[in-house]
Image (spheres, helix red, strand yellow):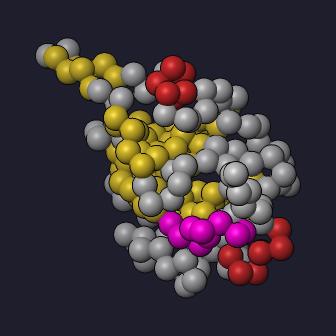
């Protein structure tokens, strides 16, 4: 598996080896030893699967008291996946990275705890699977506005289908007091 760093420390792109033959393909999407060798979590406690139609935008979401690392992959379709550093005091606070994930490119994105995550669907539909490093805690989630001008995310869509929560999400500057603090490593 190829592991590629991004401009945001801890956010990495994973490209598994794809074994193709006339029958189809085989791909290993997760292996604890490989993850450990690259400083990624070996333990995931929950798997989620969502299906969305073209134009759907989910996010930007983060958990606060019980932050989750997320390993995202697309089973079918194509999404534009985004991670935003929301750790107050981080050198990369408010910066984002975006990557196209699809059922045909097999790429995955690891988003560590302390980052907001969101994606939009650019194909007719998309099935998205993600592994989580901690359990979902109801009431612990915040939503940051997908179109926050301070973040200036370059989404490939302009009029997304949004949930009520996402349509009413606040700007990052309006939730600063609730955000996680950056922990300096000495």
Q: Which is nearer the eye, 182 or 133?
A: 182
Question: What residue lies at 14% left-to-right and 16% top-to-bottom?
Answer: 22
Question: What residue lies at 77% left-to-right and 42% top-to-bottom?
Answer: 136
Q: Residue furthest left?
A: 22
Residue 125 showing in the rendered view:
no
Q: Residue furthest bottom?
A: 149
**Residue 186, percent from left and from top:** 70, 51
Main SS type for the magenta part? loop
Count up the numbered dots: 0
Answer whether residue 93 is magenta in the image. Answer: yes
Image quadrant in which the N terminus is located: top left
Vertical placement of residue 96 versus 6, above or below: below
Quadrant of the rendered structure where residue 62 is? bottom right
Vertical placement of residue 110 versus 8, above or below: above
Answer whether residue 90 is magenta in the image. Answer: yes
Residue 55 showing in the rendered view:
yes
Quadrant of the rendered structure where residue 174 is? bottom right
**Residue 25, percent from left and from top:** 26, 21
Q: Which is nearer the eye, 79 or 164?
A: 79
Which contiguous range is marked in magenta?
Answer: 88-96
**Residue 16, percent from left and from top:** 34, 30
Q: Which is nearer the eye, 123 or 112?
A: 112
Using residue 152 as the reference point, say whether residue 16 is left or right of it: left
Quadrant of the rendered structure where residue 3 is? top left
Question: What residue lies at 51% left-to-right and 20% top-to-bottom?
Answer: 33
**Residue 56, percent from left and from top:** 50, 61
Question: What residue lies at 68% left-to-right and 79% top-to-bottom?
Answer: 171
Vertical placement of residue 140 versus 55, above or below: above
Q: Which is nearer the eye, 85 or 54?
A: 85
Using residue 175 as the reference point, say whether residue 51 is left or right of it: left
């Amino acid at each position: 598996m190829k592991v590629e760093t991004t401009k945001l420390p801890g956010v990495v792109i994973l490209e598994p080896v794809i074994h193709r033959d006339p029958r189809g393909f085989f791909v290993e999407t997760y292996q604890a030893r490989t993850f450990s060798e690259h400083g990624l979590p070996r333990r995931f406690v929950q798997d989620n699967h969502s299906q969305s139609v073209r134009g759907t935008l989910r996010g930007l979401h983060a958990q606060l008291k019980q932050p989750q690392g997320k390993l995202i992959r697309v089973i079918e379709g194509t999404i534009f996946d985004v991670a935003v550093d929301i750790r107050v005091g981080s050198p990369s606070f408010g910066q984002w990275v975006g990557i196209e994930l699809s059922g045909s490119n097999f790429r995955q994105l690891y988003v560590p705890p302390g980052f907001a995550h969101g994606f939009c669907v650019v194909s007719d539909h998309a099935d998205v699977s993600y592994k989580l490093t901690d359990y979902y805690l109801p009431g612990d989630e915040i939503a940051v506005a997908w179109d926050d001008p301070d973040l200036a995310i370059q989404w490939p869509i302009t009029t997304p289908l949004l949930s009520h929560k996402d349509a009413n999400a606040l700007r990052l500057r309006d939730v600063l007091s609730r955000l996680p603090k950056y922990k300096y490593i000495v």
